[in-house]
């Protein structure tokens, strides 16, 4: 069977576009959790996305038999990475707002990259070890510059929630790579997301009793929930795990920086927020770190066709 060499350039472009699209998710999620409780929203969105992946597997007849151990581990990762991590990030979003959330997402690249190198034993090139601090420095300058035009009164609780969520997401992100040879990304995501939804619905029935509040969702809230469930939880995650097959986790994690960078650009062009010199320098360093950390290494994995 013929094999093609993966083109590194289009993979980098896809990774960048993915993060830019993902940037709309906090705003859409904020619309929903302003109308219904966080826990109920978590149950709804993972139920919708998990059901879509399960339907895809049923239609394509692509389900592969999993060992009981693998099923249990993937379910556990789903509960941690999609259930508990969502509690952290969404309560951080609810407490601190969209701008605060976007800026704190600057922690994502550092956390995920370090955990990917540690857990997956990935060996970054020396140039990556130079690029990572450049990107982090750019993020710090961007955050500091943004707070110059807003406020330094960042809720400590909000920061704690978001850091907790990112650490869990990072661990699940890197551990999931071990299952790529055994199950498809769709099957992994179906099991993980349905597990997260199931445990959340169980808590709804036994502790939270919030289901009746679904009627409080406005038309805008319903469409925001659908957008997050379909675009973010299905399409974006599918692309992310596809990219993870062809890029090292620590290199792919650098693209999380687009969360903060695109938030700043959207604020300037759409909401006419002020830009300070530090923000411009920070944005330039982020882009320099992304190019430096990804451009030199050729992605030479072979893709069967």
Image: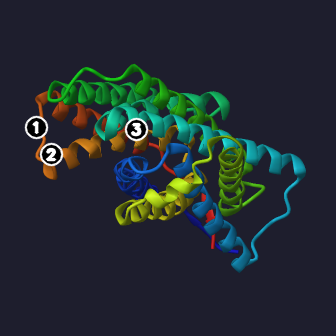
For residue 284, above or below residue 82: above
Q: Position of residue 198 (x, y in %)?
A: 71, 52
Q: In which quarter of the image is the C terminus?
A: bottom right
Q: What number of labels is visible?
A: 3
What x and y, as percent, mark residue 227? Answer: 43, 63
Task: Count neighbours of disc 3 (C-alpha within 10 A) and say few if under 14, some if 14 to 19, many if 20 or more.
Answer: many
Q: Where is residue 28 in the image (x, y as percent from the top left)?
A: 37, 54
Which is closer to the viewer, label 3 or label 1? 3
The N terminus sits in image quarter: bottom right
Which is nearer the N-term, disc 3 or disc 2? 3
For the question of whether residue 108 can be seen, the reply is: yes
**Badges 2 and 1: C-beta atoms under 8 Å apart?**
yes
Q: Mark 2 points at which residue?
A: 268
For this rendering, which residue is in front, 153 or 233?
Answer: 153
Which residue is rendered at x = 52% and y = 34% of the image?
88
Note whether 124 is above or below 72 in the view shown. Answer: above
**Residue 7 visible in the shown view:** no
Q: Residues within 10 Å of mark 1 (few under 14, many from 20)?
A: some
Identify the residue position indicated by label 1 in the image. 274
Query: Mark 3 against mark 2, which lies toward the viewer?
Result: 3
Counting residues from the start of the chain, the first of labels 2 and 1 encountered is 2
**Label 3, label 2: how many angstroms apart (C-alpha)?**
23 Å
Q: Residue at x 28, y 41 (%)?
A: 261
**Which residue was labeled with disc 3?**
94
């Amino acid at each position: 069977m013929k094999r093609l060499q993966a083109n590194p350039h289009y993979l980098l472009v896809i990774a960048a576009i993915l993060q830019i699209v993902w940037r709309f998710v906090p705003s859409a999620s904020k619309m929903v959790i302003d109308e219904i409780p966080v826990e109920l929203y978590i149950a709804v969105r993972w139920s919708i996305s998990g059901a879509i992946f399960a339907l895809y597997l049923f239609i394509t007849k692509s389900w592969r038999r999993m060992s009981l151990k693998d099923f249990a581990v993937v379910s556990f990762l789903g509960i941690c990475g999609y259930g508990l991590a969502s509690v952290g990030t969404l309560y951080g979003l609810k407490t601190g707002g969209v701008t605060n959330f976007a800026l704190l997402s600057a922690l994502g690249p550092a956390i995920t990259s370090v955990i990917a190198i540690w857990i997956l034993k990935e060996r970054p090139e020396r140039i990556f070890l130079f690029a990572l601090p450049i990107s982090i420095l750019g993020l710090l300058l961007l955050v500091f510059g943004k707070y110059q035009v807003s406020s330094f009164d960042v809720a400590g609780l909000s920061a704690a929630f978001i850091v907790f969520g990112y650490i869990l997401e990072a661990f699940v992100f890197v551990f999931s790579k071990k299952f790529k040879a055994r199950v498809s990304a769709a099957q992994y995501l179906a099991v993980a997301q349905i597990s997260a939804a199931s445990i959340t619905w169980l808590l709804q029935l036994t502790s939270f009793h919030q289901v009746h509040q679904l009627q409080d969702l406005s038309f805008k809230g319903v469409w925001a929930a659908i957008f997050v469930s379909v675009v973010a939880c299905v399409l974006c995650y599918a692309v992310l795990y596809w990219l993870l097959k062809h890029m090292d986790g620590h290199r792919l994690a650098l693209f999380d920086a687009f969360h903060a960078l695109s938030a700043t650009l959207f604020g300037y062009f759409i909401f006419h927020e002020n830009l300070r010199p530090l923000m411009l320098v920070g944005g330039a360093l982020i882009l320099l770190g992304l190019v430096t950390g990804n451009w030199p290494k050729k992605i030479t994995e072979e893709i069967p066709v």
